Image: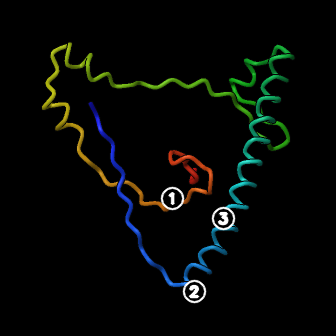
Amino acid sequence: MTLTTTQTTEVRISTALKSKLMKRLRVYDQLNAQKQATKAAMDKIKGEVENLFLDADEFDALQNGVKVEGFALKHVSGTRRKFNRKKFIDLGGSVEIYDMARPHVPTKAFMSIRVPGEPEEADNDE
């Protein structure tokens, strides 16, 4: 049996701060909506451009990279290597050595703001 708990801490802020904060957050919400709409429109155009190359049977050119009046187009079909810890251990690797080879390193700090209705996992800062 597992049990999940959530703890809520209530903090008080001044009315003046709340007023200023809400003004900025409303602007942020509007900008976020514009960003989402712009991203969706740009993704649609990317798909259309890809289909133009496919329909013209010139997809290889897109994969090699094409320049058209200053626009650079390229379809990237990337691959990456992924470390498989279980396979490493099955091949005789040591868990201790693996863990020692993975030091904790600091990452860039960031501010997270989620608009109302947005899931917690959403990443606003791309």
Q: Nearer the viewer, residue 91 or 68?
A: 91
User: Marks 1 and 3, how far apart in space?
Assistant: 12 Å
Q: Secondary structure at mark 2?
A: helix
* x then y, percent, for residue 4: 33, 42
Quarter of the image for residue 125 reads bottom right
- Callout 1: 10 Å neighbours few (<14), some, many (20+)? few
Earlier in the chain: of badge 1 and badge 3, it is 3
Residue occupied by mark 1:
112
Tell me the residue at 81%/22% (across/down).
Answer: 51
* x then y, percent, for residue 115: 61, 57
Instruction: Look at label 1 and name its amino acid.
Output: Ser
User: Marks 3 and 2, how far apart in space?
Assistant: 19 Å
Residue occupied by mark 2:
16
Horizontally, residue 34 falls left or right of residue 126, namely right
Instruction: Look at label 2 and name its amino acid.
Output: Ala
Tell me the residue at 30%/39% (across/down).
Answer: 3
User: Marks 1 and 2, how far apart in space?
Assistant: 22 Å
Q: As displayed, is residue 88 above or below residue 101?
A: above
